[in-house]
Image (cartoon, grey):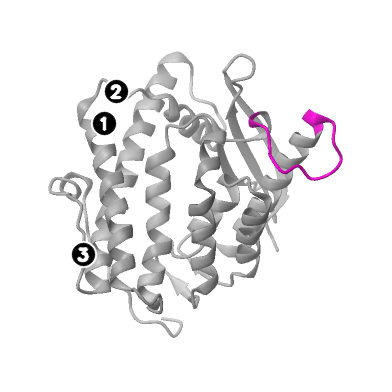
Amino acid sequence: MFGQRVPHLYSITYKNAGIDLHPLCAFDTAKEARIYLDRLTSVAFGFRGKLRELAEKDLNAMCRPASDQMRHYCVVYAMARRIDISSTPYLLARKVGIISALEALSTALRSLDCDGDSPAVLLLRIQQFFPWFVTSTFQNTRECLHDNLEDKFAEVVDLAVNSSGFAFMLEPGIIASPYLVGTKCRNSCIRRRALELLCGATVQEGLWSGKIYAASVERFMNLEEQRARDLVGADDELSILPEEARFSDVVLASDPKTPGYGRLICARFAHETTGQLEIIEDILRTMV
């Protein structure tokens, strides 16, 4: 397909994906690691989906669902960050287990490719970051908590820079992780390197389009940085973005009324005042 090998697809249900999950410290081949990562990713997204389900149930009990489906989608994902799983041993154990297994996988992938010259392992290392970060931070309502992950963000960008690229993939490959860096890292140098990667991406990875996500990340960055300048009354670029300028969740929605343009729906918890959820929207051009 488009000059690439036919992909291998594995059917994994959430019910059986995590029953026997345990950290693996070594793999003989990249294929073994690929199957294990697919399984872990399935469980990680299932965990996030369960929190989203609980959040939507709570939200629907408090008020009627919003008529704007994409805005509702953004609100639900943001509210899922406040779901307390400390009294739910099953979910708490699942979260800890997923994180431990993904961290063990990261170590195993480094050992599998000591010289760093295997494209297959390089891709796996980039992909491993996405479910690890999502699971580790999904219940953070303060974005400043991610500032201590700058080394991780920089490593992902370095790996992506060294990747050979792909013409087409049926799954998120290289794009998803730089997208996370662009929206979650507030070190200007690192996040702009991630943006450059997205701008130069010519790949289509399932629903992930490099050009479209580059446009959304760039607009998202500009929104946060402008908010920061307005807050402190500065005209120049700030080295540190205050928490009040940051958003925890962002959704890109198409707008059928204006072809070629989309809506950027951003959410954050206003900890500095009421602690309630704040939503803002912006328009960006998606036909790039």
The secondary structure type at the circle numbered 2 is: loop
**Residue 217 vertical position relative to residue 58 in the rendered view, above or below:** below
Relative to 3, 261 lies left or right: right
Give percent across and percent down for residue 52.
38, 33
Mark 3 vs mark 2, foreground winner is 3
Under mark 2, the amino acid is Ser
Residue found at x 54% / y 62%? 157
**Residue 100 vertical position relative to residue 36 in the rendered view, above or below:** above
Residue 5: which numbered mark, if any? none
The secondary structure type at the circle numbered 1 is: helix
Residue on which disc 2 sits: 86
Residue 92: which numbered mark, if any? 1
Residue found at x 26% / y 31%? 92
Q: CA distance from mark 3 to mark 2?
A: 32 Å
| In magenta stretch: residue 237 | yes
Of pointers 3 and 1, the one earlier in the residue sequence: 3
Give percent across and percent down for residue 100.
27, 46
Residue on which disc 3 sits: 26
Q: Residues within 10 Å of mark 1 (few under 14, many from 20)?
A: some
Q: Quadrant of residue 226?
A: top right
Given contact means CB atoms under 8 Å apart, are the residues at marks 3 and 1 in contact? Answer: no
Q: CA distance from mark 1 to mark 2?
A: 6 Å
Residue found at x 53% / y 66%? 158
Under mark 3, the amino acid is Ala
Q: Nearer the viewer, residue 223 or 11?
A: 223
Quarter of the picture containing the C terminus is: bottom right
Q: Residues within 10 Å of mark 2 (few under 14, many from 20)?
A: few
Per the rendered image, the range of residues in magenta is 230-243
